Amino acid sequence: MEAPQEDSAGQAVEVEAKPAVPAEPTRFTVDAEGRRVFLPGKGWMSSSAFWDIYYNRPEELPGDIDHQALHSLRAAEQTE
């Protein structure tokens, strides 16, 4: 918890907390609930666009794929 901040007159000032996680990931990330995948250099894409790359152009995939997260994504898609 941050200590209260004061302005030059000694009045308490509210300081907005910054998120600890960057708004945009920097590595392979799966958002199973949102049905999307983040690929470094390509950004967020729909799961269908990702699966197209996965099956048809695997050379475009990063080396650090989280296969457990992909399993969760596939399971989430099958519950639709």
Image (spheres, rainbow, N blue to C red):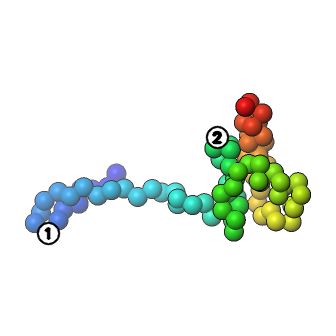
| Residue 27 visible in the current orientation | no
Query: In this rendering, is residue 46 above or below 74?
Result: below
Tell me residue 43's x, y (percent).
66, 62
Residue 7 left/right relative to 27: left
Q: Residue at x 87, y 61 (%)?
A: 57
Tell me residue 80's x, y (percent).
73, 31
The crowd level at tag 2 (other Cα within 10 Å; few <14, some 14-19, many 20+) is few
Amino acid on which disc 1 is placed: Ser
Query: In this rendering, is residue 39 above or below 67?
Result: below
| Residue 54 visible in the current orientation | yes
Query: Which of the pair 6/74 is nearer the observer?
Result: 74
- The residue tagged with tag 1: helix, strand or loop? loop
Q: Earlier in the sequence, mark 2 or mark 1?
A: 1
Q: Are marks 2 and 1 in contact (CB under 8 Å)?
A: no
Residue highlighted by disc 2: 33
Residue highlighted by disc 1: 8
On the image, which quarter does residue 4 sit in? bottom left
The crowd level at tag 1 (other Cα within 10 Å; few <14, some 14-19, many 20+) is few
Tell me residue 38's x, y (percent).
68, 57
Q: Residue at x 78, y 40 (%)?
A: 74
